[in-house]
Image: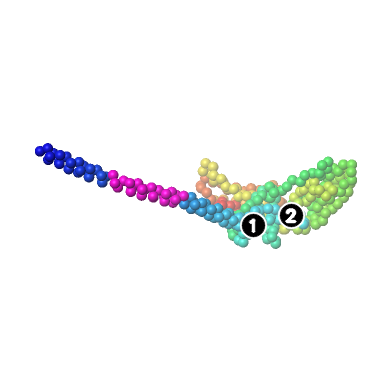
Amino acid sequence: MKGMIIVLLLAGALLFAGCIMPVSQPVVPEQEEQEEQMPEQVEEEQEMPEQEEEAEEEAPVEEEEEEQQVQEDGCTVEFQKDSSNTYYVMVKTESEKELTVTCPNEKPAEKRGELFFCTQLYIENPAIAYLDGVECDRAQFSDALQTQTEPTGQSCTVTLAPARITAGETSVVTVKAYIGDTTSEVSYLCGNEESTETGSGLLDTGKICQFDEPGTIEVYAKLDGEICATELLEVFAESKGCSVYGSESSEVSGKYTYTAIVAGRGYSGNDDLAYKCYDVPYAIKVRDIPNSTDFVTTIECSSRDGPMEENVDVTVGGDYCGQLKVQS
């Protein structure tokens, strides 16, 4: 019996050892495989920033191309005087698209070489440039005017009467200057030439000057060659004409209001300034408008019936002047 018990104990021990051994053997190879795979994953992660850097390098190139396209399709509106001191509209652009300009009185500008001519510039309305019909820039002439600095110890003024004439007509240019004890040279623009005088103390001079070319002209006065004062002269191409500009609209508490500025000169007092508001005709006699021979007035349309759908034609004496614009 003892012998059988010993044999059974030995057999049980061998079986127990056989059951636990296979469990521990596979663990080592799995850990080694994981350790071998880890460096590969690290290498792949290290490669990712390089791809991101390449994408970042490509992005600025695309931005530069877009910026260049914007510059090519953009423009800058400026004002420049010619040799006769007449102001023109100058547009700077690199675009090859068709360039057009609308004057402050909302009439098309005339292209002269690289510049654009407008009869009237000194209006509280901008000159606007377009590329293929799309606005690229606008500028206000009054904002572009530069104030001239008076020379130290010297001062002068220049006045025009009248300040709005038709080409071929005259305006009285008057210059007053305080020169001091020393003799100085005073010069000023008179038509197509420059008049010059010398003197000292208080100088009061001037003459009747004829201006033959239309446009917005800067009439200047100089002391010893330095500009000390300027005034703008509006010279119209024709003695009779009108324009509409500066349209604005608003809506307050359900009331719609539309306004525009109408300018006209050379019309008879019996002529009508005519337009329609909400299909209701209006006619104002020119004689009832202040400064009727050369007037600037405002027209208005208002109603609570809703917004107007179409622009309004405006005429003076039967001449088409432009539109009160209700649509942008």
Q: CA distance from mark 1 to mark 2?
A: 19 Å
Q: Could you tell me residue 77's position as x and y percent?
A: 66, 53
Q: Could you tell me residue 40's position as x and y percent?
A: 41, 51
- Chief secondary structure of the magenta portion: helix
Residue depicted at x 71% and y 48%: 145
What span is in magenta?
A: 24-46
Marks 1 and 2: CB-CB under 8 Å?
Answer: no
- Asked whether residue 117 appears in the rendered view, the answer is yes
Q: Amino acid at mark 2?
A: Lys
Q: Nearer the viewer, residue 207 or 131?
A: 131
Label placed on residue 93: 1
13 relative position to 82: left or right: left
Label placed on residue 61: none
Label 2 crowding class (10 Å Cα cut-off): few <14, some 14-19, many 20+?
some
Circle 2 residue: 81
Of circles 1 and 2, the one toward us is: 1
Q: Nearer the viewer, residue 61 or 226?
A: 61
Q: Could you tell me residue 222's position as x and y percent?
A: 82, 48
Q: Nearer the viewer, residue 18 or 175?
A: 18
173 relative position to 40: left or right: right
Viewport quadrant of the N terminus: top left
Q: Secondary structure at mark 1?
A: loop
Q: Earlier in the sequence, mark 1 or mark 2?
A: 2
Residue depicted at x 44% and y 50%: 43
Residue depicted at x 87% and y 50%: 197
Q: Amino acid at mark 1?
A: Thr
